[in-house]
Amino acid sequence: MTDSSKNLLLATVAFAIAFSVWGLISGLAPLFKVELELSAMEASLMIAIPVLLGSLGRIPMGILTDRFGGRLVFSVLLIFCMIPLLALAVNHSYPSLLFWGLWLGLAGSSFAIGIAFVSRWFPPERQGTALGIYGAGNIGQSIAVFFGPVLARRLEIPATFLLFGLLSLAWGLVFALWARNAQSTTRSKTLGENIQVLRTEPLSWALSLFYFLTFGGFIALGIYLPTLLKEIFLLTPEDAGARTAGYIVLATGCRPIGGWLGDRIGGVRLLFYVFLGITSLAWLMAISSIYPFTVGALGCAALLGIGNGAVFKLVPQYFPAHTGTVTGLVGATGGIGGFFPPLVLGILKDLTDTYALGFILLSAFALGCAWVLWRVFIRIPTPSQAK
């Protein structure tokens, strides 16, 4: 195995473990709601705290990775996650879940670390494929959602927290011992220089907009699909959960494909096709019939996954010296984007008694992203925008 492949494997497993830790409280939330007799608002707050911090934490983690290297930052993060998990194994009262859940949310910032770490091991023509493979590690969140409750029922909740903590600690040590930063011929950027790029590079904000749609849309539908399927089509919770699982697996599996296609035809061109496809398919989800809705949902799942891979084909291409910093911004925006659509859908449902308008707005937003892509990346390309 080559050094680049070895470090890609180490980082992908690290990312999957970090995301499983990030999603563990969400996965166990139904059990906590019953055991602690939580209201819907209390349960929502418990789930939202680690997710939101994990999204916002990507900005400083990306900056730190550009400054100190991914090996150190990723190792420290995984080892640190043992502390809140151990604390929750000892005491998982509601105040404890809120306090330690806040710190556990840092595991979600791992995405920015790995993008910067992996991209430096591969030449530009292979970065899309490599980053797509790395990004598939976000299936770790699904592992926590599906297997967390199973382990909690068999081993009880404290042992489940402890098991995930030991796994994070063990892989943190493995990563520290075996991972290596790619050699760089440029000096490390100062903290001020890394922050400056966010103020002076409008392309970083355009890429953030695109990830707000592709990753935010993936997260939003993954969270809200069970509710939609039960309310619109009167499916059983088991059936709705199985269909949602299929959606998550399809979107995650398409992420490496998006990176690979970005290497072949260019990330900009690929994203343009993705946005136009979502513009069309979102209308199918506005139809209150299970068959067109399913085609629209699965089609959007595939395109959103491909779009995720395409966006992170472009980040190291345009920002090779600030990959971690820009990844932090883009990743944070995408994470935050996962929370607004469910809120909008809920409000529109209360106002109009249907979810259809929400999907029409999704179509309009995708079309707007296509317009921004054309204006910024296609109409007047710079020499660095060769692909």
Image: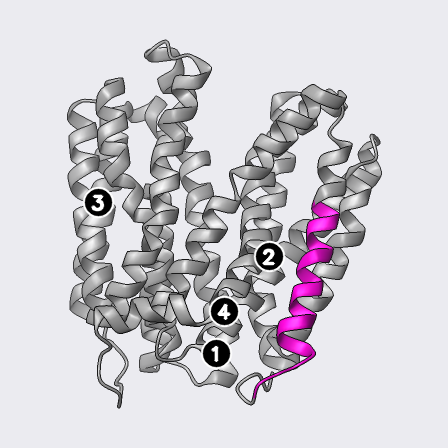
**Which badge, 2 or 1, is on the more N-terminal residue?**
2
348 sits to left or right of 325 = right
Residue 81: mark in rendering: 3
Q: Quadrant of residue 310?
A: bottom right
Gap between marks 3 and 1, in whole Å?
32 Å
Disc number for residue 202: 4
Q: Give the residue at x 81% y 43%.
A: 284
Q: Earlier in the sequence, mark 4 or mark 1?
A: 4
**Mark 2 surroundings: few (<14), some (14-19) or many (≥20) residues within 10 A:** many
User: Which amino acid type is marked by label 1?
Assistant: Tyr
**How many residues crowd mark 3 within 10 Å: few (<14), some (14–19), many (20+)?**
many
* Residue 62 point in image, percent of width and height: 32, 63
Q: Is residue 290 magenta?
A: no
Give the Cα distance between marks 2 and 1.
21 Å
| Colouring method of the image | one colour
Q: Position of residue 216 (x, y in %)?
A: 54, 48
Residue farthest along the top direction in this orientation: 37
Compute the Cα span from label 4 to label 1: 11 Å
Is residue 292 among what the camera can see?
yes
Mark 2 vs 3: CB contact within 8 A: no
Numbered disc in front, either 4 or 1: 4
Residue denoted by label 1: 318
Classify 266 as above or below 59. below
Q: Residue furthest front?
A: 200
Question: Tag 3 or tag 4, which sits nearer the N-term?
Answer: 3
